[in-house]
Image (tube, grey):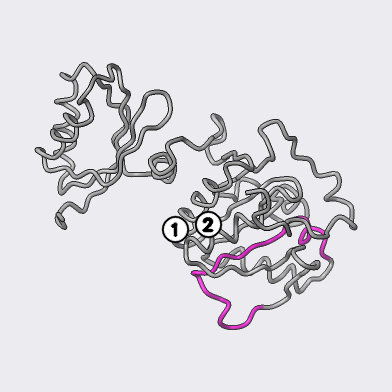
């Protein structure tokens, strides 16, 4: 409707007095300043998140200044939208982020729909991106990666997996070297591989400017020359918040069977 309003911003405010007509007053004020609301939703703890569009940032600064005279709200954030912001507006809640390690995000099985959206958002970034996913067998790691790829309209390729049988790719076809692909690596399989051709392919793809997703990143770095600091995101997926993620069984050779075959079971 307003093509000139091509600057996207995220705004979040706390509701101090949820009086009738408050949202309408805020919407009208934004509109009068030349700021469009793309999406709005309530998020946790009496907060609202908005995705906005404007043609100049000074208009939002004017709104922030004027809001100081509105006793009913308190502006908390005005910034370029982050992945967490978009998901908060879409789902009405914030995804769980570790307070100390800002690249660590936690999900439970019942939040797998939010995880799929989260992965789809970051899969649309360009260039090198390394994502690690921790979780016990059959919790939904593989299905989330595949569903996120589909949502992002990306092709996915398994370089190592236990999906149907234990697989270790040793080469790619010419057309598979595509920066738009999502490359999936099972860190438990690759770390134990004795096939140098497979390990060389993994090293090659790790330096390839594309999205790489590694299941069991802690096991992957044990057998390869990488560290957790190389990862851009670490995701933990649990059946519930109290489930412990352990690796004893993964270190046994016979464990690599049918790990995440139950696609979307229990959803």
Choose between 197 and 169: the one closer to the eye.
169
Residue 56 part of the magenta-drawn span: no
Residue 187 part of the magenta-drawn span: yes
Q: Position of residue 260 (x, y in %)?
A: 73, 56
Image check: 101 left or right of 127? right
Residue 195 to residue 18: above or below: below
Label 2 vs label 1, nearer the camera? 1
Residue 120 to residue 87: above or below: below
| Helix, strand or loop at mark 1 | loop
Residue 256 to residue 158: above or below: above
Disc 2 to disc 1, C-alpha distance? 8 Å
Instruction: Quadrant for the N terminus, please.
Output: bottom left
Residue assigned mark 1? 125
Q: Residue furthest bottom?
A: 174
User: Which quadrant of the structure image shows residue 22?
Assistant: top left
Choose between 246 and 146: the one closer to the eye.
146
Q: Position of residue 266 (x, y in %)?
A: 67, 48
Q: Residue furthest left?
A: 32
Residue assigned mark 2? 129
Q: Position of residue 199 (x, y in %)?
A: 74, 67
Image check: 212 left or right of 226? left
| Helix, strand or loop at mark 2 | strand
Choose between 107 and 105: the one closer to the eye.
107
| Disc sitting over residue 224 in the figure | none
Q: Which residues are magenta?
A: 172-193
Image check: 132 left or right of 84? right
Q: Identify the residue at horizontal 52%, vertical 53% (top origin).
A: 119
User: Tag count in the figure?
Assistant: 2
Q: Position of residue 70 (x, y in %)?
A: 18, 20
Is label 2 in contact with label 1 (beta carbons under 8 Å)? yes
């Amino acid at each position: 409707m307003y093509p000139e309003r091509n600057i996207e911003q995220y705004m979040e405010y706390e509701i101090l007095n949820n009086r009738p007509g408050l949202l309408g007053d805020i919407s009208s004020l934004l509109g009068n300043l030349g700021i469009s609301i793309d999406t709005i939703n309530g998020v946790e703890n009496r907060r609202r998140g908005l995705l906005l569009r404007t043609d100049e940032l000074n208009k939002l600064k004017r709104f922030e200044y004027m809001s100081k005279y509105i006793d009913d709200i308190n502006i908390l954030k005005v910034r370029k939208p982050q992945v967490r912001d978009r998901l908060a507006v879409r789902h009405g809640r914030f995804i769980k982020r570790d307070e100390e390690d800002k690249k660590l995000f936690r999900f439970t099985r019942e939040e797998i729909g939010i995880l799929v959206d989260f992965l789809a958002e970051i899969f649309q970034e360009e260039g090198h991106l390394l994502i690690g996913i921790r979780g016990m067998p059959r919790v939904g790691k593989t299905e989330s990666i595949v569903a996120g790829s589909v949502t992002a309209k990306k092709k996915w390729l398994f370089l190592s997996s236990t999906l149907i049988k234990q697989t270790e790719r040793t080469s790619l076809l010419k057309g598979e070297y595509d920066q738009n692909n999502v490359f999936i690596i099972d860190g438990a399989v690759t770390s134990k591989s004795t096939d140098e051709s497979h390990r060389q392919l993994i090293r090659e793809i790790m330096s390839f400017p594309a999205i790489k997703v590694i299941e069991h990143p802690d096991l992957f770095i044990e057998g390869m020359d990488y560290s957790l600091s190389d990862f851009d995101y670490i995701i933990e997926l649990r059946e519930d918040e109290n489930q412990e993620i352990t690796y004893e069984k993964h270190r046994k050779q016979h464990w690599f069977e049918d790990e995440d075959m139950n696609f979307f079971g229990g959803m």
